[in-house]
Image (cartoon, rainbow, N blue to C red):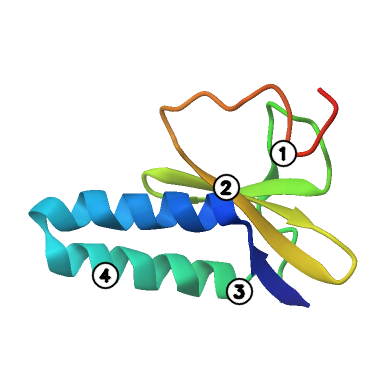
Amino acid sequence: MRIVWSPTARKRAQAAVDHIRLDRPQAAYEWLDRLVHRIELLPDFPEQGRVVPEWHEPSVREIFHEPYRVIYEVLDDRIEILTLSHVRQQLPPGPPGSAS
């Protein structure tokens, strides 16, 4: 199973790195390395994350990489990283692309 990052997820991960890098450049790269490592484990354990409680969609799950929620969708042939959301940020009413 392959991993695909949505443009939104890439943009938010880059913004997080940029923010951390302002005060702690080395910590920013370490945070990113740990994030990528966590995500690379998903194909072996795609259901390790919990179902996103706000959305109640079984295929849309999340893992935590402090201080972010990494929201991903498990599909037949891939895992799509949909977005990163700060733990204090409220999610929109439904997953990206939903009719909610």
Neighbor class of circle 3 (other Cα within 10 Å; few <14, some 14-19, many 20+) is: few
Tell me if I can see residue 21 in this picture: yes
Secondary structure beneath dot 2 equals strand
Secondary structure beneath dot 1 equals loop
Instruction: Tell me which label, 4 or 2, sits earlier in the chain.
Output: 4
Does the residue at mark 3 contact the one at mark 4 (Cβ under 8 Å)?
A: no
Does the residue at mark 3 contact the one at mark 2 (Cβ under 8 Å)?
A: no
**Residue beneath disc 1:** 96
Residue 10 horizontal side relative to residue 52, left or right: left
Q: Is residue 57 above or below residue 33?
A: above
**What is the three-letter code of the residue carrying label 2?**
Thr
**Residue beneath disc 4:** 29
**Distance from Cα at disc 3 to Cα at disc 2:** 17 Å
**Residue beneath disc 2:** 83
Instruction: Tell me which label, 3 or 1, sits earlier in the chain.
Output: 3
Secondary structure beneath dot 3 equals loop
**Residue beneath disc 3:** 41
Task: Judge depth for marks 3 and 4 and give the one in front.
Answer: 4
Q: Residue at x 37, y 44 (%)?
A: 67
Tell me if I can see residue 43 in this picture: no
Instruction: Tell me which label, 3 or 2, sits earlier in the chain.
Output: 3
Does the residue at mark 2 contact the one at mark 1 (Cβ under 8 Å)?
A: yes
Residue 90 horizontal side relative to residue 88, left or right: right
**Distance from Cα at disc 3 to Cα at disc 4:** 19 Å
